[in-house]
Amino acid sequence: MPQRRCLLTGQRAEAETLLRFAIVTMAAGQGEAVEPDPAHLFPGRGLWLAPAPDAVAMAVAKGMFARAAKRKLQVPADLPARSLAAWTAHAAGQVTKARRAGLVLADAAADGDGETPLSCDAAALGLGSLVLKSAPLTRRAAADLALLARLLPVSQDIGR
């Protein structure tokens, strides 16, 4: 698994455990801006943060995105809120895909194929606890839900 370095802490971690931000080109003549990239769709190396309730706001306040990119960037004032909304929507989409694929189980006993099911806390999405069949899609969904749970402020974290 590729390792990336957190902008704030400098610690290395697996890419799936960090928040990814991308540098996107704005309209002609407006420069470049930072955007949340939970699905890892934008090109480039990306800018990475360890998920914490105030990590994005702290990185914005300290100018860490421009420093890491080594160039001037536009950082939206509402980037922390946009980031939370982007990761929430992405995690909800992953759970929806798993449901459509029949990979969400009613309980652990329902898994008859001998694989160990994955349990994940989806309380951040109002879904409580989920049991998922072990598959690449569900492993990614479980990782995204764990990342989202660490990103939420304690007052919003329903399941903790």
Image (cartoon, rainbow, N blue to C red):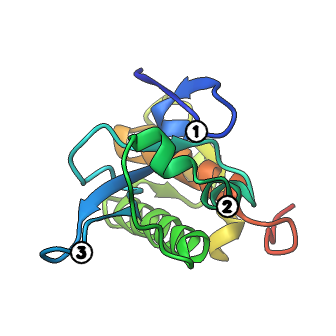
What element does badge 2 sit on? helix
Pointers 3 and 1 in contact (C-beta within 8 Å):
no
Name the residue nearer the viewer: 22 or 143: 22
| Dot 2 or dot 1, earlier in sequence | 1
Q: Which residue appears at 40% of the width and 22% of the height?
A: 2
Q: Circle 3 is placed at which residue position?
A: 30
Q: Nearer the viewer, mark 3 or mark 1?
A: 3
Q: How far apart are marks 3 and 1 (CA)?
A: 25 Å
Q: Can you say which quadrant of the picture contains the C terminus?
A: bottom right
Pointers 2 and 1 in contact (C-beta within 8 Å):
no
Q: Residue 61 carries which label?
A: 2
Vertical relation: 1 (above or below) 144:
above
Name the residue nearer the viewer: 157 or 47: 47
Q: Residues within 10 Å of mark 3 (few under 14, many from 20)?
A: few
Q: Which residue appears at 41% of the width and 20% of the height?
A: 1
Can residue 139 be seen from the camera position used here? no
